[in-house]
Image: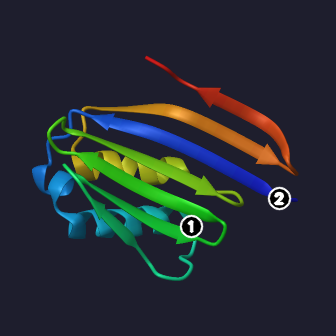
């Protein structure tokens, strides 16, 4: 039985400046989030992209994790697309603490089993 889960969330009011700007902290946070979800990396461990903040991605088989920050807006986002069951909410709670965020909004949650959509929920402001 093939399962795919996608969850995306937005963190706002982030008070940890180092977590918003330091890519090494971002890589460490994404690594810990991956452990909490319970998946193993595949290939090159991380890709880091720079901008006003940064984006760290990690490929996990046919899946991926991504953490992006916008330091000037004091915001961050996390996306987990996992090919099998996962514990993404543990990772979200951890990242919320790491970023010292005031708020976390789940913006998308999708769950597919055997190619059929079981759940799709998108929250908009």
Q: Residues within 10 Å of mark 1 (few under 14, many from 20)?
A: few
Classify residue 4 as left or right of residue 87: right
Question: Which residue has dot 1 on it?
Answer: 38
| Picture layout, residue 16 above or below residue 108 | below
Asked if 46 appears above or below 99 in the picture, the reply is: below
Q: Position of residue 38 (x, y in %)?
A: 56, 67
| Residue 104, x across and y down, in percent | 37, 34
Q: Quadrant of residue 66?
A: bottom left
Q: Residue at x 49, y 20 (%)?
A: 124
Q: Return the residue nearer the eye: 15 or 122.
A: 122
Q: CA distance from mark 2 to mark 1?
A: 17 Å
In the figure, 111 relative to 20: above or below?
A: above
Q: Earlier in the sequence, mark 2 or mark 1?
A: 2
Q: Which residue is mark 2?
A: 2
Q: How is the image coloured?
A: rainbow
Toward the bottom, the furthest residue is 43
Residue visible at 69% across and 57% down in the picture:
85
Classify mark 2: helix, strand or loop: loop
Residue drawn at 30 percent across, 69 percent down: 28
Q: In the rendered image, is residue 7 in sight?
A: yes
Label 2 vs label 1, nearer the camera: 2
The residue sitting at 61% across, 37% down in the picture is: 109
* Crowding at mark 2 (Cα within 10 Å: few <14, some 14-19, many 20+): few
Q: Secondary structure at mark 1?
A: loop
Q: Can you see residue 87?
A: no
Image coords of residue 110 (percent x, y): 67, 39
Residue, far top = 125
């Amino acid at each position: 039985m093939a399962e795919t889960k996608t969850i995306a969330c937005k963190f706002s009011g982030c008070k940890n400046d180092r977590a918003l700007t330091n890519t090494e902290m971002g890589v460490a946070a994404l690594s810990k989030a991956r452990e909490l979800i319970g998946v193993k990396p595949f290939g090159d461990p991380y890709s880091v992209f720079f901008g006003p903040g940064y984006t760290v991605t990690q490929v996990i088989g046919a899946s991926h994790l991504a953490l992006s920050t916008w330091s000037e807006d004091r915001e961050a986002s996390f996306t987990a697309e996992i090919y099998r069951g996962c514990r993404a909410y543990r990772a979200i709670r951890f990242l919320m603490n790491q970023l010292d965020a005031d708020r976390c909004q789940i913006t998308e949650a999708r769950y597919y089993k055997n190619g059929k959509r079981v759940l799709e929920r998108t929250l908009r402001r």
